[in-house]
Image: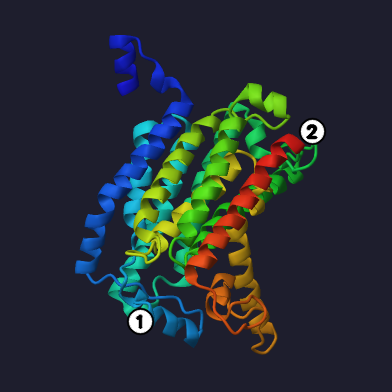
Amino acid sequence: MLGDLLDQLFGLTLFEYISVRVVAAALTSFALALLLGAPTIRWLKSLRVDDNVDTSGSADLATVSRDAGKDRTPSMGGSFLVVSFLSGVLLWGDMTRPLVYLGFVLVAGLGAVGFLDDYTKLTRPKSGGMSRRAKWLGLSVVCLYAIGAAVQSARLTGRSRLTSLYPPLFKNVEISPLEWAGIWGVVGLVGFIAFEWLVVVGAANAANITDGLDGLAAGCVFISGLALTIFCYVTGREDWTSYLNVPYVEDASHMAVVGGALCGACMGFLWFNAYPAKVFMGDSGSLPLGGVLGWMAFVSKQELVLPLIASVLVIDAGSSWLQTFYFRHSGGKRIFTCAPIHHGLQLYGGVFVKRPERMHEVTVVIRFWILAAVGALASLALLKIR
């Protein structure tokens, strides 16, 4: 509305450019996070919303967390992060675009599930939050709605590229399961939606697992989100996709505005979450942040590259899931010193073997940020390699 008004009064068309709105969304979300952060933290402290530190079954981690005062640090900081993020999208994103609208609904829905989980932990400290079944049901309903609506919209408008998969490193290779004939078409439809559900829900849970050290999850999501913002912008530009030989997805460039808001909100949250953290993210922030990374990968057709784009999230989540699986099926044995592996480095200085000296939390976080940046840069290089 502001853009239309400026155009009518002064002939200014500045806000028609997506690149301008990406920057504006980032600055708006950043400023809102700074404005909302301090009063939200004071409010959470007044409610004694203290984080139930996930000790992963480690007494050493419980001791370290207690000694560092983390048991007295308020959680649910993701609430003001998500509000800042969604506000930036509402102000600068084009909500008439289905991909932007569904992305907004996805983040709001995952944020609601995470908030309910955090609130349950607050009101029922011994419950550990929502039951695993209820939490997975909530995540699945939100994700399946967004993915199903996007797939149906793509089918009705003939945008087949959105419902295809594109393996990296290969030219002109396209997997289109929705175009298979007969019963295989039904199988392809169900399989594609299930795969995209796995991408979005998996990314949401990976961010949730990574959220264990001050600034770790927010910093890694910022880096991965910046790379995916570039991917979305490129994928929505027909001239650029033609030059780079990558799939063109109409309206994907508008998701870059969502990516800008994501990066700005993460920067604003890091202002308060950097070591020593004044507030923790909680499920109300980590679940929607991870989910929107998966959604942006879906829109930009980088689902198969997402493990590289969000390498730290995948490594942390993979180590946690692998440790749990091996522990249950080996009679109590462990692969890693502690999982997720950022805690192994923090507590024991090593991933597989305990070392005499611990690694400081800040050192672990910064090195993981570096790994995240390397993965994001490597993923962007695949644009030209293809």
Q: Which mark is residue 172?
A: 2
Q: Which mark is residue 126?
A: 1
Q: Position of residue 259 (x, y in %)?
A: 48, 40
User: Picture quarter containing residue 384?
Assistant: top right
| Label 1: element kind | helix
Label 1: few (<14), some or many (≥20) within 10 Å? few
Relative to 299, say whether 60 is above or below: below
Residue type marked 2: Asn
Q: Position of residue 318 (x, y in %)?
A: 63, 66
Relative to 326, say whether 79 is above or below: above
Left/right of residue 72 with respect to residue 106 in the rendered view: left
Q: Position of residue 149 (x, y in %)?
A: 52, 40
Asked whether residue 209 is in view, the answer is no
Relative to 363, say whether 303 is above or below: above
In which quadrant of the rendered image does the N terminus lie? Answer: top left
Q: Position of residue 261 (x, y in %)?
A: 42, 41
Q: Earlier in the sequence, mark 1 or mark 2?
A: 1
Looking at this view, name the residue that lies furthest to the left: 46
Q: Nearer the viewer, residue 353 or 293?
A: 353
